[in-house]
Image (cartoon, rainbow, N blue to C red):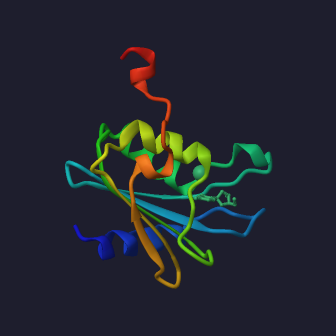
Amino acid sequence: MDMKTLIHQAIEARKKAHTPYSNFQVGAAVLTKNKQVFLGCNIENASYGLTNCAERTAIFKAVSEGEKHIEAIAVVGDTDGPISPCGACRQVLAEFCDEHTKVYLTNLKGDTIETTIQDLLPGYFSSKDLGK
Ligand SMILES: O=c1ccn([C@H]2C[C@H](O)[C@@H](CO)O2)c(=O)[nH]1
Ligand SMILES: [Zn+2]
């Protein structure tokens, strides 16, 4: 699956966002190494801190269906430049991405960067730090 198709799916996923508090919608689409796609949106809560970002929604859907290895992920928001995932999502990405995983960050204007988890979160805490 190419970058454009995955980004298009993230744009569609964004439409499901539950954002009564921020009114800021984000969509994500995860492509696993087994070529399955999982979509996610941000899901806010009246107890604001319980909000789940789009990236984590999509990743948790994949993992809970037994798909732990991410080939690519696209994330989209209505940002000025390509969206920038929060720290929590970067750490969750680090758990399921490898150095080959393509991370596409984009916005509604189509400004897109392709990056990696190493670039997004250098020196991330990992299973290696736990001796696993
Ligand atoms: O990469 C991001 C950045 C922000 N948000 C969400 C969290 C919250 O619902 C809203 C505003 O921070 O956007 C995401 O889902 N992903
Ligand atoms: Zn996040």
Is residue 41 something that shows in the picture?
yes
Q: Viewed as shown, does residue 45 lie left or right of 123?
A: right
Q: Which residue is the extreme one toward the bottom?
A: 109
Is residue 12 something that shows in the picture?
no
Asked if 78 appears above or below 84 in the picture, the reply is below
What is the x, y in percent for residue 102?
33, 58
Name the residue located 62 percent from the left edge and 68 percent from the top edge.
25
Q: Which residue is the extreme one toward the top?
A: 131
What is the x, y in percent for residue 32?
28, 50
Asked if 101 appears above or below 88 in the picture, the reply is below
Quadrant of the drawing holding the N terminus: bottom left
Name the residue located 48 percent from the left edge and 36 percent from the top edge.
123
What is the x, y in percent for residue 40?
48, 57
Name the residue located 72 percent from the left edge and 69 percent from the top edge.
23
Q: Quadrant of residue 74?
A: bottom left
Asked if 87 appears above or below 72 in the picture, the reply is above
Asked if 122 appears above or below 20 in the picture, the reply is above
Quadrant of the drawing holding the C terminus: top left
Q: Nearer the viewer, residue 50 or 81?
A: 81
Name the residue located 39 percent from the left edge and 14 percent from the top edge.
131
